[in-house]
Amino acid sequence: MKYCAFLRGVNVKGTNMKMADVCKVFKEAGMEDVSSILASGNIVFSSDKKVSDLKDILEKAMSAYFSYEAFLFIKSSAEIESVWTGNPFEKNDHFHSYTFVGNQGVENVLMKEFETASKTENEKGQIINDIFYWQVPKGDTLDSSFGKILGKKSMKDQFTSRNINTFEKILKKMTS
């Protein structure tokens, strides 16, 4: 089965790694057809193992190789397609749209945080099919009240976020 692993905290705040090295770790851990999408830690691969086993194997391998506490979230190609097609926001050159991949139920935690955060004009959050989507004006991502919540250390093992356009690139790679 084809999967994509979304690594949290890659190439930000001092956790730097080359995607070629990450792919090498995945291959050495027994994954097949390994490739990366962008430098933000999106690794497409194939495996016959269960997702829960893959998560454990890959987090341990990444932690050992890079000497950091690795967190990753694994989604199948069908789940990736669901994220892409479920996006409730229209493409707009003035906004970024993000989606969140994480532990079961994290979308409700994120929605609660979003609802209590102060918002910029036209900033929106919505849950579709158990996925939290966030739209924010370009330039306001890191300055928004909700954007600051995303970096909380207490949530580092709960989720990671990606621009919605990343899912399109991942889908193209998975289906080519």
Image (cartoon, helix red, strand yellow):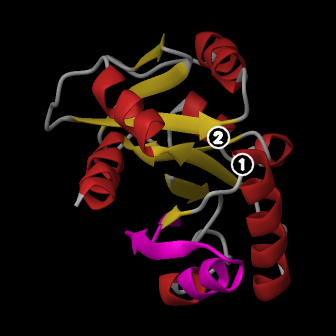
The residues tagged by marks 1 and 2 sit, at their Cα atoms, a distance apart of 28 Å
Mark yes or no: residue 43 visible: no
Residue 89, x across and y down, in percent: 27, 21
Magenta residues, start to end: 23-44
Q: Residues within 10 Å of mark 2 (few under 14, many from 20)?
A: some
Is residue 131 shown above or below 67? Answer: above
Q: Quadrant of residue 86?
A: top left
User: Which residue is rendered at x = 42% and y = 44% of the image?
Assistant: 77
What secondary structure is marked by label 2? loop
Q: What's the amino acid at mark 1?
A: Lys
Comparing 165 with 56, the one in front is: 56
Disc number placed over residue 50 in the picture, else none? 1
User: Which residue is rendered at x = 56% and y = 17% of the image?
Assistant: 130
Is residue 169 shown above or below 152? Answer: below
Q: Quadrant of the C terminus?
A: bottom left
Residue 110, x across and y down, in percent: 65, 23
Is-magenta flag for residue 40? yes
Q: Which residue is mark 2?
A: 150
Residue 63, x across and y down, in percent: 82, 75
Left/right placement of residue 103 relative to residue 18 reads: right
